[in-house]
Image (tube, helix red, strand yellow):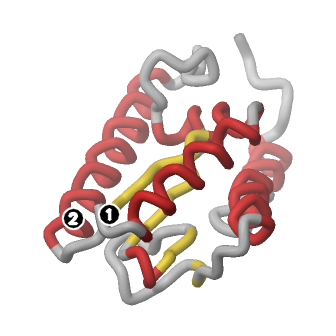
């Protein structure tokens, strides 16, 4: 299928894709804030710059889009039909970087949790899971 947009139009459209302060990130922050937890954002000193950091719990949270970070088995993890080699290389690099970052953080003593964009379609389940995890960490487990 031929792209119906010019390269300038496509570039403009792609430039609007945000790397931080995305809707899903704001949604997770809102859940945490309502639960009474405080956190920091985009800590530049940490590998991978986690989206949300709860220093008290040594917890780094990444909020990943299913498309860009290849959420296994998710229906939103589709592959574009054009420029397949480009996209496959891009996705493989993203997944490899994510694994390196998680390993590095864990070596440094951090707990790492990934919230997938599709999970936020059921925000109460995300909130319940966060609550269980943080209560368990508060208790020292």
Q: Is residue 86 above or below residue 95?
A: above
**Residue placed furthest toward the front:** 139
- Looking at this view, is 62 or 37 the one in front? 37
Mark identifier at residue 111: 1
Q: Residue at x 55, y 23 (%)?
A: 77
Q: Quadrant of residue 30?
A: bottom right
**Residue placed furthest toward the top:** 1
Tell me whether circle 1 and circle 2 mark residues in contact (CB < 8 Å): yes
Residue 34 in sight from this viewpoint = yes
Q: Is residue 74 above or below residue 43?
A: above
Mark identifier at residue 46: none
47 left or right of 108 in image: right
133 left or right of 39 in image: left
Q: Marks 1/2: CA distance? A: 6 Å
For the C terminus, the quadrant is bottom left
55 left or right of 4 in image: left
Kind of element beneath mark 2: helix
Labels 1 and 2: the sequence-earlier one: 2
Q: Is residue 129 above or below residue 84?
A: below
Mark identifier at residue 106: 2
């Amino acid at each position: 299928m031929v792209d119906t947009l010019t390269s300038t139009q496509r570039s403009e459209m792609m430039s609007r894709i945000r790397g931080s302060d995305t809707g899903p990130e704001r949604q997770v922050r809102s859940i945490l804030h309502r639960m009474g937890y405080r956190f920091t954002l985009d800590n530049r000193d940490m590998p991978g710059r986690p989206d949300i950091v709860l220093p008290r719990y040594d917890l780094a949270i990444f909020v990943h889009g299913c498309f860009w970070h290849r959420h296994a088995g998710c229906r939103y993890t589709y592959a574009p039909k054009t420029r397949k080699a480009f996209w496959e290389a891009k996705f493989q690099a993203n997944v490899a970087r994510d694994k390196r970052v998680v390993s590095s953080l864990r070596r440094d003593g951090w707990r790492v949790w990934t919230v997938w964009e599709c999970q936020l379609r059921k925000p109460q389940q995300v909130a319940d899971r966060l609550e269980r995890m943080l209560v368990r960490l508060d208790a020292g487990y």
